């Protein structure tokens, strides 16, 4: 049985020079908004944790919640990280992601 890997080189008919369709930008925005919410909620818990073990458990909980936020949007963590890395050096893409996160 042959396994088909998803093709993440997007068609050139979209609106970004990096070939990232608006639909993916919207999914990224929703994931980024959810991740920001998780970070905000759990950072206070980490600050209030009494032991390093408690802080570690909360950090692991946050990591799981962030992965879930990404995967709930139909994105892989690898794809999410690739787009974020690209946005670090591309102000236009960074702006599109920021706008999508704000709209989420």
Image (cartoon, rainbow, N blue to C red):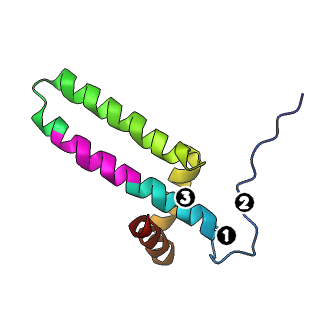
Image x and y of residue 71, in percent: 54, 43
Q: Which residue is mark 1?
A: 19
Q: Dot 3, crowdedness within 10 Å: few (<14), some or many (≥20)?
A: many
Question: Mark 3: which secondary structure?
Answer: helix
Q: Name which residue lies at 82% across and 34% down.
A: 3
Residue 38 versus residue 53 in the image, above or below: below
Could you tell me which residue is drawn at 43 percent across and 73 percent down?
99
Could you say where residue 42 lies in the image, as x and y percent from the top left?
24, 41
Q: What residue lies at 47% left-to-right and 68% top-to-bottom?
A: 100
Q: Identify the mark nearer the N-term, 3 or 2.
A: 2
Foreground: disc 1 or disc 3: 3
Residue at numbered disc 3: 27
**Horizontal placement of 76 versus 55: left or right?**
right
Marks 3 and 2 in Cβ contact (< 8 Å): no
Q: Using a 10 Å C-alpha cutoff, classify the residue at mark 2 as few (fewer than 14 neighbours), some (14 to 19) or many (20 or more).
A: few
Q: Is residue 43 magenta?
A: yes
Write down the region rendered in magenta.
Answer: 34-44
All told, the count of numbered labels is 3
Q: Earlier in the sequence, mark 1 or mark 3?
A: 1
Using the numbered discs, state the Cα–Cα distance from disc 1 to disc 2 in whole angstroms.
7 Å
Among the two numbered marks 1 and 2 on one chain, the one whose residue lies closer to the N terminus: 2
């Amino acid at each position: 049985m042959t396994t088909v890997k998803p093709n993440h080189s997007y068609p050139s008919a979209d609106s970004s020079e990096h070939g990232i369709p608006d639909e993916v930008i919207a999914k990224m925005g929703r994931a980024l908004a959810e991740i920001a919410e998780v970070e905000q909620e759990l950072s206070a818990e980490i600050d209030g944790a009494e032991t390093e073990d408690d802080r570690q458990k909360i950090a692991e909980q946050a990591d799981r919640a962030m992965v879930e936020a990404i995967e709930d949007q139909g994105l892989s963590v690898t794809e999410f990280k690739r787009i974020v890395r690209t946005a670090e050096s591309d102000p236009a893409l960074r702006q599109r992601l920021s706008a999508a996160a704000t709209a989420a």
